[in-house]
Amino acid sequence: MQNLAKLSAPILSLSFVAGLVLWAYPEGAAPARQIGIILGWVGCGMLLASLFLALREPRLTNLLGGVENMYWWHHRLGLAAYVALLAHPLLLAGASLPKAPQEAWELLSPFTESWPVWMGWLSLLLLMAGLGATFATRLPYRIRRPLHAGLGIATSVGLIHLLLLGIDEPVEPLLLASLALLAWRFIREDWGVGASPYVVQSISRVSPNVVEISLAPLGEPLAAKPGQFVLVAFQSGRRFKGCCEFHPFTVSSIDGASGLRVAVKALGDCTRNIQSIEPGVPARVQGAFGEFLGNPASTPQYWIAGGIGITPFLALLRAGRLDRPTTLIYLYRSEGDALFVDELNAIAANLPNLALRLRATGDEPIDPESVLPPGEDVAKAEFWLCGPPPMIELLAGFLRRRGLTNRWMHFENFGAL
Amino acid sequence: MPKIYIVATATFWIFVSGLWLAGLSAPKTLAETSVPVEKGYSLTDVAAHASPSDCWMTIQGKVYDVTGYLPDHPSRPEVIEAWCGKDGSKAYDTKTKGRRHSEAADRLLEGYFIGDLKQTTP
């Protein structure tokens, strides 16, 4: 059932794109021109589908195989649309090249007075800047974020380009749909109108660069399970000035019927600022998302955590549920980077099903053989990995070489949200 | 994914530059190389070519055989085909919310010129 839900995002997206192409299929034009027009519609459809998949409504994410699945397709459809839309004007202009090179350039040139061409160029340049900012991870988040949002605006500008060319069907309803999706995303999700109000109840210092924040609901609480994550925007308190940006945090504990805790590591400007948060600060919370640690198989379980990646496992252990033999391998650079170790030791002492292995890896790359010795039978186990992407990549590759298939490996992955 | 972005973007700009250079180095447009035609047609003549497979139209006192251009027109086919066999001057001048077609379109149109519109007395 979950596999079907995961496939629904690409099936819906590609069906929508195919429908647009069939509707607008150009007949009688030169082959290069035909391909150029088709690629224009393919890009347009993929951009709209990508915009739709950027919505973070919990019910929608459940229908479409989870927010990670939606974002996986959101990224790929966005990039594929970009490539198609770059080729679109080149092929249209290229079709005229053999008989009239000057006209080929005039068709493309932004220097001739033509609103349709200007809108086409504006859309392409917004896409170029938005995707460039997405990949330029060294750029500050406050610059990358608005540039990435420009990708949504590029979709509407591209549709205006089509309207100005005299193509009003089916462009008018598509333009309305793109504006509605943009408004939905900006108002309900980025501004937090659709988020639940919470308040910071208490703060616990876990390490010099990690705090654990306890949140209490001010209204209807969110339904969260261990292993899931929430998006939280911390606002301003009496002395604390929040950055009000939504960031993903794994739930580290579910407290009673309504409260929850998140552990925040100082990784950027906003999360560094959150280290000085105070009780009473209001927060907007969206979620909960993800299915990490959900529906484990009946085989032995291996949990591998790196650094702050201990939080989903901690949430499940704190909930006191462990009905399968489980090995928790916690990797950290040095003793000073180990989080919640005393609590983990205390839990392990009381849970006979849990084998806890703590491992300081140092600054050298991790040796997978030392984490999972050759004699250990891992082929019939299920693995759950959460930590820095290089660690997950290294260990997943190692496990595959040991005969484990992807079906038995699960990753917590929300870095690109 | 960043590699695909970089390769696609660089390729795009290389091709745009190539088209620009090709346009600069091209001596003449199709319209400029066309053989001038000195012939006059009446509106009745034009009206006899009113289908997408044989489409003439008059624009600003000139007659054009745009049959070969119809598949290349960017809008829906009905938008331009509705003017086959008729005077399309007003439609040509009021595209995109009252804005007329671009100068590039003017030059393109010249390639399909076949004669002048004969003035008829009432």
Image: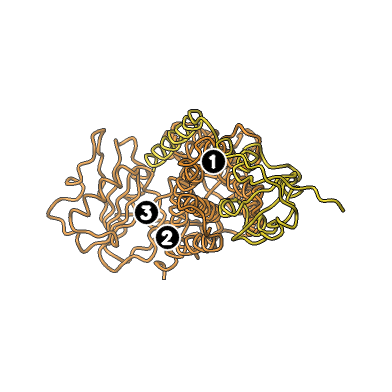
Per the rendering, the mark at residue A124 is: 1
Badge 1 amino acid: Leu
Q: Which residue extends farthest right?
A: B122
Q: Residues within 10 Å of mark 3 (few under 14, many from 20)?
A: many
Instruction: Name the quadrant containing residue A377.
Output: bottom left
Real-space Cα distance between discs 3 and 2? 13 Å
Question: Which part of the image, by quadrant, shows the N terminus of chain A?
Answer: bottom left
In which chain is the residue bearing label 3? A
Residue corresponding to mark 2: A291
Q: Which residue extends farthest bottom?
A: A1
Indicate whether A15 appears above or below A235.
below
As helix, strand or loop, the secondary structure at mark 1 comes to: helix
Per the rendering, the mark at residue B25 is: none
Q: Earlier in the sequence, mark 3 or mark 2?
A: 2
Q: Earlier in the sequence, mark 3 or mark 1?
A: 1
Does B44 sit left or right of A20 as displayed? right
Indicate whether A21 appears above or below A117.
below
Badge 2 amino acid: Glu
As helix, strand or loop, the secondary structure at mark 2 comes to: loop
Q: Are marks 2 and 1 in contact (CB under 8 Å)?
A: no
Instruction: Name the quadrant containing residue A382.
Output: bottom left
Per the rendering, the mark at residue A313 is: 3
Please provide percent x and percent y for residue A82: 48, 45
Q: Residue at x 73, y 42 (%)?
A: B99
Q: Earlier in the sequence, mark 2 or mark 1?
A: 1
